[in-house]
Image (cartoon, rainbow, N blue to C red):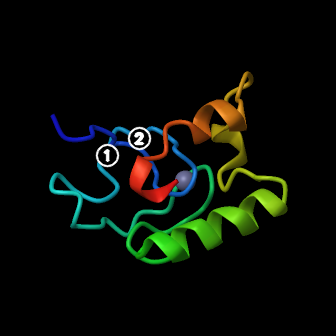
Amino acid sequence: MAEDKKHNCHVCGLYSEDLPWGKDGQSPTYIICDCCGVEFGNEDYTVESTKKYREEWIKKGAPWFISKAKPLNWSLERQLMNIPNKFK
Ligand SMILES: [Zn+2]
């Protein structure tokens, strides 16, 4: 079976009920990620731009875009493991 991480942000690995890049993984929703603040289809358009955005976000201390959405026991390391392999 193909990799099944269509619910996860390409930058930070956050799980969302929506499919950030659509059912086919090719149709970005242009929704903003609650966690890293990427706009799906914009800064994560290529693997390179995704890595660059992630690097800068982590350098800033990995702040949540919607700070109240941050879970109490949130772990950056754990969430990063959910990034689709292609974008790691
Ligand atoms: Zn994200």
Image coordinates for residue 64, horizontal then vertical, percent: 70, 50
Q: Is mark 1 within 8 Å of ligand 1?
A: no
Q: Residue at x 67, y 29 (%)?
A: 71
Image coordinates for residue 22, horizontal then vertical, percent: 22, 57
* Disc 1 residue type (three-letter): Asp
Image coordinates for residue 79, horizontal then vertical, percent: 59, 36
Position of 47 with respect to 65 (left or right) is left
Say which element carries label 1: loop
For label 2, the residue is 16
Q: Residue at x 52, y 75 (%)?
A: 48
Q: Nearer the viewer, residue 39 or 2?
A: 2
For label 1, the residue is 18
Q: Nearer the viewer, residue 85 or 83?
A: 85
Badge 2, how many Cα within 10 Å: few under 14, some, many 20+? few
Q: Which disc number belongs to residue 45?
A: none
Circle 1/circle 2 CB separation < 8 Å: yes
Badge 1, how many Cα within 10 Å: few under 14, some, many 20+? few
Say which element carries label 2: loop
Position of 58 with respect to 11 (left or right) is right
Gap in Å between the C-alphas at discs 1 and 2?
5 Å
* Disc 2 residue type (three-letter): Ser
**Residue 15 in view (yes/no):** yes
Tell me where residue 20 sits by quadrant.
Answer: bottom left
Q: Residue at x 76, y 53 (%)?
A: 63
Q: Nearer the viewer, residue 85 or 13?
A: 85
